[in-house]
Image (cartoon, grey):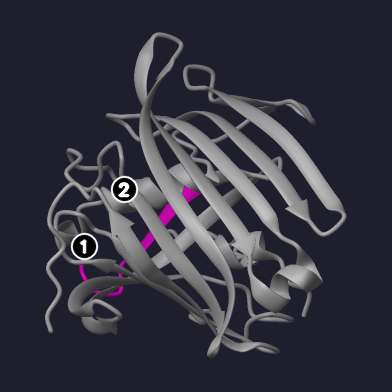
């Protein structure tokens, strides 16, 4: 299987059908989950083999005279995977501190000999985006980008939902609208390198086919606390088997993270 860090990280092959019972654009609560200076580092593993490092860094910035969050995601292969695939992907987002909606997104990809760069700006009043590569597109209200989606989910009040509820966020990526469907599976305690911790579990819906066997072959765990910190992603892929993204280090979280021994 060709290593494509991006597709795995954003859970490629999202199901595009819309369930009428889905909660569209679940509102965000006041932000207690993250602050400027937060740095999260993840290890990307195929089974027991480390294949890459993913880093999320959040700072405060000015965008058109507004104080916004500026998030940078870096995805890099390591070891043998780096020699074979040579992935160095960077995704940046400038998003509103209150609504969590993005104003600008940059995608800067280098995967082997393949490179791609694009900038997308968001017109919130006109519900449109302007892509440097493809021009202006009309998009759904409250559309997100790849990076801001990660932080948006951390601000959802899951106490208002019950186990089995289906939620939908729209994401603009690679000059297309991607409906991001996921199921809230309730709470579960998992083991991490730091110790056990109670988590909120969600499962993005994926398309059964070449990559995935079942629609729930991807699971994501967030800490069940004020940080709602993503600690692990598990993917069951046809050829590769179990693939994990696990929290390796965390710095400057908005609240203390309490793990059990």
Judge whether 5 appears above or below 153 on screen.
below
The residue under label 2 is 26
Q: Could you tell whether 188 is left or right of 249 in the image?
A: left
**Quadrant housing the C terminus:** bottom left
Q: Quadrant of residue 138?
A: top right
- Residue 166 shown in magenta: yes
User: Which numbered disc flags the more N-terminal residue, 1 or 2?
Assistant: 2
Seen as rendered, the residue at the extreme top is 65
* Label 1: which secondary element: loop
Judge whether 90 appears above or below 225 on screen.
above
- Disc 1 crowd rating (10 Å Cα; few below 14, some 14-19, many 20+) is some
Q: Is residue 27 visible?
A: yes
Q: Position of residue 105 (x, y in %)?
A: 57, 33
**Quadrant housing the N terminus:** bottom right
Please give the range of residues in magenta: 162-170
- Residue 100 shown in magenta: no
The residue under label 1 is 161
């Amino acid at each position: 299987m060709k290593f494509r860090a991006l597709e795995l990280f954003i859970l490629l092959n999202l199901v595009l059908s819309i369930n009428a019972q889905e909660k569209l654009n679940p509102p965000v609560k006041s932000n207690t989950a993250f602050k400027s200076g937060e740095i999260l580092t993840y290890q990307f593993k195929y089974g027991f083999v480390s294949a890459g490092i993913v880093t999320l860094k959040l700072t405060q910035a000015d965008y058109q005279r507004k104080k916004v969050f500026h998030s940078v995601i870096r995805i890099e292969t390591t070891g043998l995977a780096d020699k074979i695939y040579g992935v160095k992907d960077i995704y940046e987002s400038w998003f509103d501190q209150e609504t969590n909606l993005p104003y600008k997104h940059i995608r800067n990809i280098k995967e082997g000999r393949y490179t791609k760069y694009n900038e997308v700006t968001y017109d919130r009043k006109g519900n449109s985006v302007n892509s440097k590569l493809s021009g202006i597109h009309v998009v759904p209200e409250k559309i997100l980008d790849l990076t801001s989606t990660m932080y948006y989910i951390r601000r959802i009040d899951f106490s208002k939902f019950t186990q089995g509820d289906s939620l939908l966020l729209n994401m603009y990526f690679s000059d297309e609208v991607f409906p991001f469907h996921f199921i809230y599976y309730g709470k579960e305690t998992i083991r991490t390198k730091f110790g056990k911790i109670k988590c909120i579990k969600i499962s993005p819906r994926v398309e059964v086919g070449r990559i995935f066997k079942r629609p729930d072959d991807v699971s994501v765990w967030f800490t069940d606390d004020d940080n709602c910190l993503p600690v692990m992603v598990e993917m069951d892929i046809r050829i590769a088997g179990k693939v994990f993204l696990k929290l390796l280090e965390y710095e400057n979280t908005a609240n203390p993270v309490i793990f059990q021994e």
